[in-house]
Amino acid sequence: MAKIIKFEYQNQPQSFNLDGWFNATEAAARFGKRPVEWMNQRDTVEYLAALYEQMGGKSDFLQQFKEISILDGSSASSRAKLLRLAKKTGLVYAKSGPSEVGGGTWFHPKLAVAFARWLDIKFAVWCDMQIDAIIRNGLQMNSFSHLIPLLLRPDVAEWELRFHDEYYHALARITGTKYTGHSGGTPAIYGNLTDKWVYGCILPKEVYAELKARKHQSEKMHQWLTDGGKAELDKQIQRVTDIAASSSSLQDFESRMNTVMRKSGQLSIVYTSGLAV
């Protein structure tokens, strides 16, 4: 299966892959529904059959869809038959396991609008726009510039405290400096370490460059992050704090951070391999 990316809809991640397929199980759960409930419906069966035919499907296969469409949708046997046939169309893909590792029922991008409208009209419009952006931009592993509007706010938010004293005390420990608060300023190395091990680890380089370009001198970078970005920021701040607080030196800290980030994956906001978040 192609690489998976996470887009945020109303503070909740939704999974797509680089071919435009989307995790229908994850999307439906947001609205208290399941993909199979949609696939059981007569209109859905007709839609799948028509789409399959337009994509060059065999006519004898279409007859099986028509036969199932007249069965009782609540029947376990008819649901099982429909799911099997849906998979044979190549428009549905199922993988066991939780959504965090790519598990769930995945739908072809051509099913997105029909399925998402069944869930919620506004969600359908949003979902269609994400798939269009994925396919139109032809996402590549080394290009994330299209994610700028998804990860960065259009305007700066009000300041709020995100880097607490324990973070700076941990940095002071590994750099052999003193931290007595921000009133007198902090050593430049704190900013360098924050750039490298906090923002540099959670944002793709194109997004990070845009963030630095947007930020005015009086603003903090986290003021430009979306809510999902701030959540990842908080996790990374805590990770850096914990490792710095238990490291014997700056060299030890950076060695351990390199190891941890290689294992966890650098682009934790937007990217997952389908094997691990």
Image (cartoon, grey):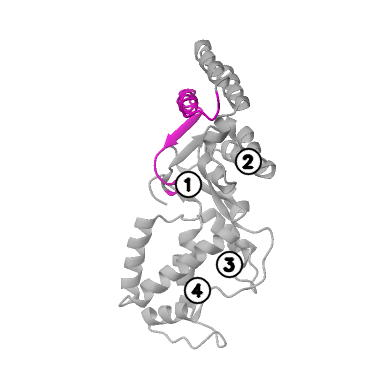
Binning the other alpha carbons within 10 Å of mark 2 as few (below 14), some (14 to 19) or many (20 upward) gives: many
The earlier-in-sequence mark between 1 and 3 is 1
Of the image marks 2 and 1, the number of the one nearer the N terminus: 2
> What is the x, y in percent for residue 117?
66, 37
Nearer-the-camera pick, 76 or 252: 76
User: CB under 8 Å between callouts 3 and 2?
Assistant: no
Q: Is residue 47 above or below residue 220?
A: above
* Quarter of image, res 214: bottom right
Q: Is residue 77 magenta?
A: yes
The reply to whether dot 2 and dot 4 touch (C-beta < 8 Å) is no
Q: Which residue position is annotated with label 3?
A: 222
Discs 3, 4 touching: Cβ within 8 Å: no
Quadrant for residue 209, please give it. Answer: bottom right
Instruction: Identify residue type, mark 4.
Output: Gly
Mark 2 = which residue?
Answer: 119
The image's mark for residue 142 is 1
Distance, label 4 to label 1, CA atoms, is 26 Å
Say which of marks 2 and 4 sits in front.
2
> Which structural element holds mark 1?
loop
Magenta-drawn segment: 72-100
Q: Residues within 10 Å of mark 4 (few under 14, many from 20)?
A: few
Q: Give the foreground label among 3 and 4.
A: 3
Q: Report, in whole angstroms, how far the alpha carbon at label 1 lies from the one at label 3.
A: 24 Å
The disc at residue 150 is none
Distance Cα–Cα, label 3 vs label 4: 13 Å
